[in-house]
Amino acid sequence: MGIHVREKRGKLYLDIYKDGLRRWEATGLSVSTDGVSAKEARKLAEIIRAKREMQLVSEAWDISDPIAGKQSLVAYAEQLAARKDKNNSLPKSLRYLREYAGTVQLSAINERWLEGYKSFLLDQKGLGKSTARNYLGACTFVLHQAEINRKIVRNPSVAVKKIRPNEVKKVYLVAEEIAALAAVPLQAKVGYELCRGFLFACCTGLRVSDIRSLKWEDIERTPKPAVLKKQQKTEDIVGIPLNMSAWAIINDGTIHKKDEYVFPRLAEKKSSSSDKFKAWCRQAKVEKIIGWHTARHTFATLSLESGADLSTVSRLLGHRDVSTTSIYAKTTDRAKRVAVDALPPIELGARKTTP
């Protein structure tokens, strides 16, 4: 491997020979007719050559790039955030990261700095614990990518504990309540489609964003019906088999174009659905307060109660961490009852009295 500074038509280039291949890279410098300026340009080009050589050697030996490590954390986070949906935690967290990180370089981030950022997020008024957890996770993602791209030697977030969210009781529906709702769907066009979408989510665990954006090209018919879709929130692809109930909800026998929405009225109308859900529950005599995410909770909880293992349910929900799915295991009272009832019987003998 070799790198040399070459001049061509008054411009300075890097002549790079690596792995049997030669290529030229522009330095952006020009050679002036003035001798002093030309000398300074060549001196600067030599500095660029030395830095470029360090980068290529680091790449060849699989060690961190000493030049890239000097990039600021915020600049790198902004670069990654530009590729994400605006509702992703990374773009949302940038205002807090900018305020706390300032111009700190990637190579300067360590466990103490991350612990400080964690405390900073937890101290922010109006920022819930769960959101703070997500924003810290976004920073962890940035550092993970920096490690992959050899901008840092190691990811310090590995040694920093995540923020534990407050435990909240997740509302879910039991089979009898789902049946009651399914028996009396709302009759208006938008309301009826809302009911169909909600029940479909109960069968698949899809988020409302994925229900609204679901197209027929995301539905596989053979060998058996299934959803194969990139999630709106995480951008990960999730595959979910469709049971008979789920397929019956969307299959009306019509041949649809691939770019058609499965729930077109939901795709068009994105206003609050709380009033419709309340009316539906009153009509079905279901006393719980439900929303779109109730369907996802229902799918997760009933799947676990039916005997599905945690890792399988985690994959169906599109969770990256099984610990996120384990929250649902804590809400399954029916499963707890089954576990307790399965314990071996204990028969206590009669108390003997002494004279």
Image (tube, rainbow, N blue to C red):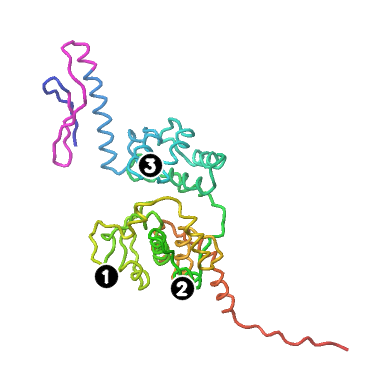
The picture quadrant where one finds residue 319 is: bottom left
Quadrant that contains the N terminus: top left
Badge 1 vs badge 2, beta-carbon distance below 8 Å = no
- As drawn, is 178 to the left or to the right of 235? right
The magenta span reads: 12-40
**Where is residue 12 shown, x and y percent of the image?**
17, 23
Foreground: 329 or 25? 329
> Any mark on residue 153, and which?
3
Instruction: Specify the amino acid type for callout 3.
Output: Val
CA distance separating discs 1 and 2 = 33 Å
Q: Tell me if mark 3 has few (under 14), some (14-19) or many (20+) residues whose alpha carbon lies within 10 angstroms of its own.
A: some
**Where is residue 324 shown, x and y percent of the image?**
47, 57
The picture quadrant where one finds residue 82 is: top left
Q: Earlier in the sequence, mark 3 or mark 1?
A: 3
The picture quadrant where one finds residue 341 is: bottom right
Foreground: 250 or 27? 250
Instruction: Specify the amino acid type for callout 2.
Output: Gly
Determine which residue is flagged by label 1.
Answer: 253
As helix, strand or loop, the secondary structure at mark 1 comes to loop
Foreground: 322 or 190? 190
As helix, strand or loop, the secondary structure at mark 3 comes to loop
- Of marks 3 and 2, the one in the foreground: 2
Determine which residue is flagged by label 2.
Answer: 307
Instruction: Specify the amino acid type for callout 1.
Output: Gly
